[in-house]
Image (spheres, rainbow, N blue to C red):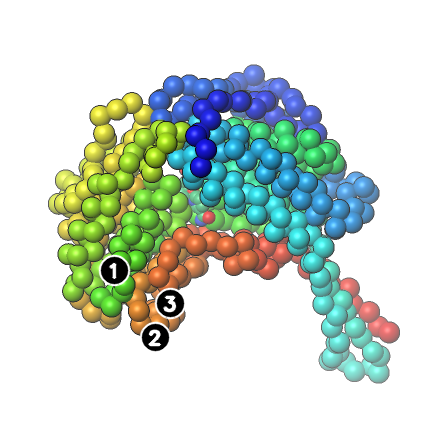
Amino acid sequence: MNAIDHSLRLPRTDLYVNGAWVKASSGKTIPVFNPATEAQIAEIAAASVEDVNRAVEAAHACFESAAWRRMRPLDRGRLLEKLALLVEDHADELARLETFDNGKPYATSRYVDLAFTIDALRYFGGWASKSAGEYITLSPFFDDGGIYRAYTERKPVGVVGGITPWNFPLGQAIQKVAPAIAFGCTVVLKPSEETSLTTLRLAELIDEVGFPKGAVNIVTGYGHDAGAALVDHPLVRKIAFTGSTATGQRILAASSKTMKRVTLELGGKSPTIILADADLERAIPGAANAIFGNSGQVCTAGSRLLIEEAVYEEVIAGVAEIARGLRLGPGLEEGTQLGPIVSSRQFERISGLVQSGLSDGARALAGGNRPDRDGWFFEPTVLADVRPDMQVITEEIFGPVVCAIPFKDRSEIKPIANDTPYGLGASIWTRNLDHAHLLADEIDAGTVWFNTHNILDLAVPFGGTKMSGLGREFGTEAINAFTEPKAVVMRL
Ligand code: NAD
C-alpha cells in the first residue's frame, strides 16, 4: 500500500435538492469533528422541516414525471454503473474523508466501506432490469365458463426516505440509494448528523453523473427534526432506516400515521459461540475480529463471547492478548488497527457502560480505560465474570467491548444465545458441522455464520429478528423492500 495522503478536500455542505445545491432555510449548521483530534473540521447545514418538504416534493415530482417513469430499467442501471465508476475513481479521496469524519482506520475506509459501496452500486445496477412479475392461471370459485388469467408487476413504492447511521456512512447511504433507484423509486436521504461528509461528496458525484433532477436528494440535519419530517411526510411512501432500536421504534410508530412501508435495520448483541472442538487458531482471532473490527461499531459485532468451559481459559486469554496488542491511533496513521470512537457522546456511553460493568463485579482482562491521549479513543476491552442481569450484557454497547460467558454443555447454548431482545447475527465456531447446523436452527438471528463472523454479501438477505429490525435488505429480498406487487386480473 502507498503512503496515506493526509490532505482533506471538503465537499459542499449545503443541501442537495432537485439537482441543485441550496442553503438550509434555517440558516443553522451542525459542527463536524475529527474524532482522532477532537478538532472541528467543518460545519454542515441543518435542514428544517420546510427544507425536507421541498426535497420530498422534488423527489415526488421526479417520480411522477414521464421521463422517470419511462426510463428504461437498463438506463437506471447505467446511472448506477456510471456512479460506481466515479466513486471508484475517487475511492482514495472518499476513504480519507470517511476517516477524517468517522475516525476509522484508512484501510477500513478504503477496503471495506469503499469496496462495499462500489460493489453495491454495481450489484443493484444489475438488478434494475431484472425485476419481474408472475403470470397466473386462476381457478374462479364461481365457474362461469370463462378463462381467467392474472399477471403481476413489481411497481416501485414511490418516494423513499433513507435515514442512515454513522458507522458505515457511505456504504449505508448507497444501501438505500442504489436499490431505490434500481427499482424505479426516487429518494430523499438524510445521513447521520455525526458523519455526513462522504454522503455530501457522493451528492457531488451524483450531480456529475447527471441523474434526473429530484431523483436523489440529500438533506443533512438532525434526526428529531429533519429525520422526523421525512417520516411524517405523506408523499414519502417508504422509510429505509438503519440505526438504533429506539429510533426504529419511533419511526415505526410515526410511519403508521401515513401507512408507510418500512425496513428497519437496528441494533444487536450478537453471540460468538466457540465450542471445545473448534479450531482455536482460527476461532480466537476470529472472535477478536468479530468485536474489535471498526472499534466494535458494527451492528452485528460479536459482543457476547460464549465459550465451552473446556476451552474457556485458553480462549479468553487469547482474545485478551490480541486486544492488548492492537495498535490504537488516528485512522490516517500507518499501521493503525483501531481508530477512535466516532463522537464524545458515543465515547461517554461506552465508557459509562464499561464502568457500570466493573462496579457490578465484572473483571477486565484487557482494556477498560481511555488511553492518555487526545481523541475519543477507548481501549479494546475484554470483560469476564459477567452476570446475565448486568447492563453490559443486556444493552448494545456499540464499542470495542466484549463480554465472555462460559457454558458447560451444548444444551446451555440456545438459552444463553437467545437471552437478548436482539436477533441480528451469531457465529458458531466448531469442527462438527452437525452441531453447527442444529445450533443454527435454534438460534434466533437474521444471519448465522459458521467459522467466520461479519461476512456480509449483497446477494444474501440481511436483517434482524426481534428488536433487531423489520424486513430484509440485499439479495432478492431487496426487490420486495422497494417495490409492491400489482396484480392485473383478466377474463379472456
Ligand atoms: P441513531 O438511531 O441514533 O441514528 C440513526 C439515524 O436516525 C441518524 O441519521 C439520526 O439523525 C436519525 N434519527 C434520530 N432520531 C430520529 C427520528 N426521531 N426520526 C427520524 N430519524 C431520526 O443510530 P446511530 O447512533 O447513528 O447508529 C448506531 C445504531 O445503528 C446502533 O444501534 C447499531 O446497531 C445500528 N446499526 C444497525 C445496522 C443494521 O444493519 N442492523 C447497521 C449499522 C448500525
Residue 267 percent coordinates (x, y): 40, 47
The residue positioned 82% from the left and 69% from the top of the image is: 490
**Is 147 positioned to the left or the right of 262 in the image?**
right
What residue would you read off at disc 3? Answer: 440
The residue positioned 43% from the left and 54% from the top of the image is: 455
Please rate how many residues cluster around mark 1, counting C-alpha atoms within 10 Å: few if below 14, some from 14 to 19, many from 20. some
Q: CA distance from mark 2 to mark 1?
A: 18 Å
Q: Marks 2 and 1: which is nearer the front?
A: 1
What residue would you read off at disc 1? Answer: 280
Q: CA distance from mark 1 to mark 3?
A: 20 Å
The answer to which image quadrant residue 275 occupies is bottom left
Q: Say if residue 142 shows up in the picture.
A: yes
Residue 120 percent coordinates (x, y): 57, 47
What residue would you read off at disc 2? Answer: 434
Q: Marks 2 and 3: which is nearer the front?
A: 2
Quarter of the image for the C terminus: give it.
bottom right
Q: What's the amino acid at mark 1? A: Leu
Numbered disc 3: secondary structure: helix
The residue positioned 71% from the left and 45% from the top of the image is: 78
Residue 93 percent coordinates (x, y): 53, 30
Q: What's the amino acid at mark 3? A: Ala
Q: Which quarter of the rendered image does ligand 1 occupy?
A: top left
